[in-house]
Amino acid sequence: HLCKGVNGLEKVLLRESRGSSAEVYLYGGHVTSWKNDHGEELLFLSSKAIFKPPKAIRGGIPICFPQFGSHGTLEQHGFARNRFWVIDNDPPPFPTNTSSRAFVDLILKPSEEDAKIWPHSFEFRLRVALGPGGDLMLTSRIRNTNPDGKPFSFTFAYHTYFSVSDISEVRVEGLETLDYLDNLQNKERFTEQGDALTFESEVDKIYLSTPTKIAILDHEKKRTFVLRKDGLPDAVVWNPWDKKAKAMADLADDEYKHMLCVEAAAVEKSITLKPGEEWRGRLELSAVPSSYCSGQ
Ligand code: TA6
């Protein structure tokens, strides 16, 4: 149901029968909380997040559209996360019937102002749902509604911040041996080495043509996040580490230790839609107990 969140910004609370829950702010269509049925918060939200437009909320799952990154005319990561979405009470039917009962449909359409910076018409429908086992499912459907027959291209990411006990005891599996663009080295292309990713310094890499499934193992919590994606070939891995964290007003200095961004994305190749065409990008997150011990 709809209620007032931080600074009076409206948010929707989702609760699933076994007790898992999620929160989505209409501002940004931004998921800021996903809790398991023990009430444990699974997403990272900065203690200094600024809930004040036009600043994007630091943490949770920012939606990067119509651009991932900071090239070109648009601001960093586009503008979908900086706009007010509205609840869509009558969405077109979802082919894949989400078995969950706990879901909300939001919609974003561009304003006149938006059309000045990105001259296209679109309908962006976002469904946020809690699955029966407490999984969090996000489905984005983006349709080109240009009246002038013009196609448009975009890049996209679910910029997900996972809550982790200690970044230096986290491993990521599923990205080994893949090529990536290193944002810290002029987006040059490299190949990842052969075993799970571990973290001991700033990382900002765009992995290309990644598998559907990526696992994030938290040693201390004995918990594995499983990220499943569809329509999103790339995966961005980011942690600002200490220096960059200090320079961010909306992140406490030591909070980088308790977050890791693994972002289902379409970055290397932009997505092009002709008028009337619709793209769908799905993300499914689950958190399962894991017997991972470091060095495994
Ligand atoms: O997640 C990758 C990235 O592009 C990083 O380069 C960093 O800028 C991060 O996004 C956060 O961007 P934001 O605009 O949310 O501060």
Image (cartoon, rainbow, N blue to C red):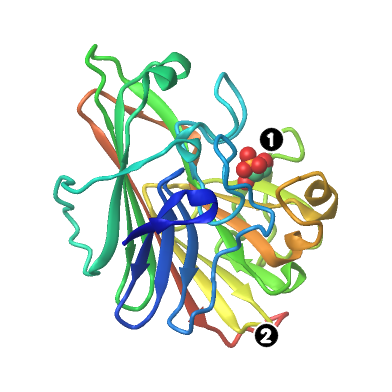
In the rendered structure, which amino acid carries the disc numbered 1?
Lys
Q: Which residue does the numbered mark 1 point to in the structure image?
A: 187
Mark 2, Cα crowd under 10 Å, few <14 / some 14-19 / many 20+, is: few
What residue is drawn where x is 59% and y is 38%? Answer: 55
Compare residues 217 and 177 and report the one nearer the observer: 217
Q: CA distance from mark 1 to mark 2?
A: 33 Å
Q: Position of residue 213 (x, y in %)?
A: 45, 63
What residue is drawn where x is 35% and y is 66%? Answer: 14
In the rendered structure, which amino acid carries the disc numbered 2?
Cys
Q: Residue 68, located in which quarter of the rendered image?
A: top right
Q: Is residue 84 left or right of residue 143?
A: right
Q: Which residue does the numbered mark 2 point to in the structure image?
A: 293
Give the quarter the ligand 1 occupies.
Answer: top right
Q: Position of residue 134 (x, y in %)?
A: 38, 75
Compare residues 190 and 161 and report the one nearer the observer: 161
Compare residues 251 and 267 and report the one nearer the observer: 251
Q: Secondary structure at mark 1?
A: loop
